[in-house]
Amino acid sequence: MRTGGVEGSVRRPDIALWDTLKNEMACARWVTDYGDEEVYASGLTVGDWYYISADNASGGTPGTFTLCVTDHAVNDFKADAVTIDDLNNWALNDRVTGTVSNGVAHLTISGVDPFINYSGTVCIDSEISRYLRLQVKNNTDGNNLTIYYKNSVTNAWNFKSIPITTDDAELKSYTIEMAGEPNWTGTINTLRIDPPGSEGTMELDYFGILSADQLTTSMDVRESKTSSDFVSIFPNPVVDYLTVDFCTSGDATMELSTIHGQTVASFNLFATRNRVSLSDLPAGLYVIRIAQGADLFGATLIVRN
């Protein structure tokens, strides 16, 4: 919503987005008498109706305004990305050394409390960017990677740790949901990555901060096969058909749910090799769970269409 000059005469503009049940999905309050106010929303359903309300706040005056609507992401991280030919403002600290080649940081860790921090300006809107995405190859003596961050509200250090594999033969991708973290709020202004161990090597291919919409579109995810001792699934990402291979025959069940826990599909599987159509599912990140007897398997699955 734009005001001021030729763009409108409303003073102290407020704007909000609503669904058909009159639930407010996003809002922006005036900051200056005239200027731009922006609201963003993710997770909207194609085909549903949404409503925009515009008003002047208390002490303001009614009048005209300019309204701009777009379905594009605030920032296309993939399109705006550049190949990393150097450490690009990432600083190596406390017994971390390394070089960059072919867009990958090759790091050597040789002591306790190693970390990598971004020394440039960070300005991440926590309401929009709710996921972290990393691709790493871990050959250190540890298996928990930690992300430290500061927000504009408290400016204190907060952290999120995730388990990762060790003795990796190749780069592996990890997705971290930050939406449920109570301190992922305000503007995130500082970032730091602590490698999982105190001795060994680690490769870091990319580190992305993404919205829900960008999660499945902005990162370079290689097609792969995901497996356990009794079952394997491929391809991942999947476009239409997912193949589920069991080591032994026997009745099994497969359930797909969103990352928020909502079950979207379930299947009964009987053959050693099963071909399951997922073409009706919207593109996105899902959690897959497979049970065969006492054996349980879980993984994340990316659906593209």
Image: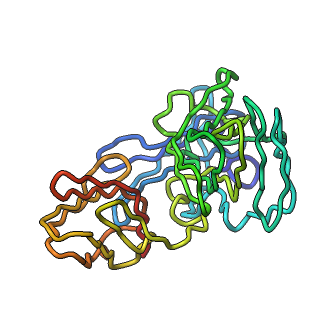
Q: Quadrant of residue 78?
A: bottom right
Q: Nearer the viewer, residue 10 or 215?
A: 215
Q: Quadrant of residue 115?
A: top right
Question: Is 78 left or right of 43, judged from the image as shown?
Answer: right
Residue 123 in picture, x, y percent from top left: 73, 41
Q: How many callouts does the rendering have?
A: 0
Report if residue 120 is visible in the image: no
Report if residue 21 is visible in the image: yes
Residue drawn at x 36%, y 60% is: 228
Q: Nearer the viewer, residue 98 or 49?
A: 98
Residue drawn at x 56%, y 57% is: 173
Residue 49 in picture, x, y percent from top left: 35, 59
Q: Is residue 110 above or below residue 242?
A: above
Residue 180 in picture, x, y percent from top left: 46, 35
Q: Quadrant of residue 235?
A: bottom left
Question: Is 208 left or right of 102, judged from the image as shown?
Answer: left
Q: Is residue 168 above or below residue 23?
A: below
Quadrant of image for the C terminus: bottom left
Q: Is residue 178 above or below residue 218?
A: above
Residue 53 in picture, x, y percent from top left: 47, 46
Q: Nearer the viewer, residue 280 or 25?
A: 280
Residue drawn at x 35%, y 69% is: 233
Q: How is the image coloured?
A: rainbow
Question: Is 294 left or right of 287, judged from the image as shown?
Answer: left
Residue drawn at x 66%, y 33% is: 148
